[in-house]
Image (tube, rainbow, N blue to C red):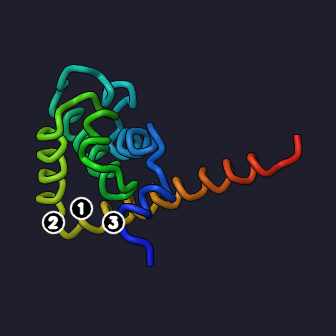
């Protein structure tokens, strides 16, 4: 049975996937989640959700999240804690669980397509 480390190695996070999913779910432009400033509360919350998805659904370490979002590791830890607290609300918890599964499935599909392309004759 693969441990968390080997799972991360087999299924690497795809840059931008968590940002696209969180932006779509939150109704904010994806580019605003990658902006260097905090932005309005709605944008900051969407970014926290993207960080959470990157860490939980895609298996990225907090250090990898910090590199992806160009912020420090403590900010990533805080973002995940905020979303975990929101998951105490049953409706949000159901939606977050669905989004986690969808993002992980999207990652798996993209990686499978890439693997097929690598093995395809040129």
> Residue 67 at what x, y percent from top left?
30, 33
How far apart are labels 3 and 2 at the CA level?
A: 12 Å
Q: Is residue 77 left or right of residue 7?
A: left
Q: Is residue 31 above or below residue 84?
A: above
| Residue positioned 69% across, 52% down in the render | 115
> Residue 28 at what x, y percent from top left?
34, 33
| Residue positioned 11% across, 59% down in the render | 85
Q: Which mark is first along the chain, 2 or 3?
A: 2
In the picture of the structure, the residue carrying the numbered disc 1 is 92
How crowded pointer 3 is (Cα within 10 Å; few <14, some 14-19, many 20+) is rated as few
For label 1, the SS is: helix
For label 3, the SS is: helix
How far apart are labels 3 and 1 at the CA level?
A: 8 Å
How far apart are labels 1 and 2 at the CA level?
A: 5 Å
In the picture of the structure, the residue carrying the numbered disc 2 is 89
Residue at the right extreme of this rendering: 121
Q: Quadrant of the N terminus?
A: bottom left
Circles 3 and 1, Cβ within 8 Å, touching? The answer is: no
Judging depth in this view, the residue of 34 and 3 nearest the camera is 3
Q: Quadrant of residue 50?
A: top left
């Amino acid at each position: 049975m693969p441990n968390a480390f080997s799972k991360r190695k087999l299924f690497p996070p795809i840059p931008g996937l968590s940002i696209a999913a969180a932006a779509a779910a939150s109704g904010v432009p994806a580019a605003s989640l990658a902006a260097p400033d905090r932005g309005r509360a709605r944008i900051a919350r969407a970014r926290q959700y993207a960080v959470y998805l990157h860490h939980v659904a895609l298996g990225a370490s907090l250090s990898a999240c910090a590199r992806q979002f160009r912020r420090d590791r403590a900010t990533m830890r805080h973002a995940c804690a905020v979303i975990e607290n929101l998951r105490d609300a049953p409706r949000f918890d159901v939606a977050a669980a669905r989004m986690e599964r969808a993002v992980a499935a999207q990652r798996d599909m993209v990686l499978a397509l890439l693997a097929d392309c690598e093995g395809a004759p040129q």
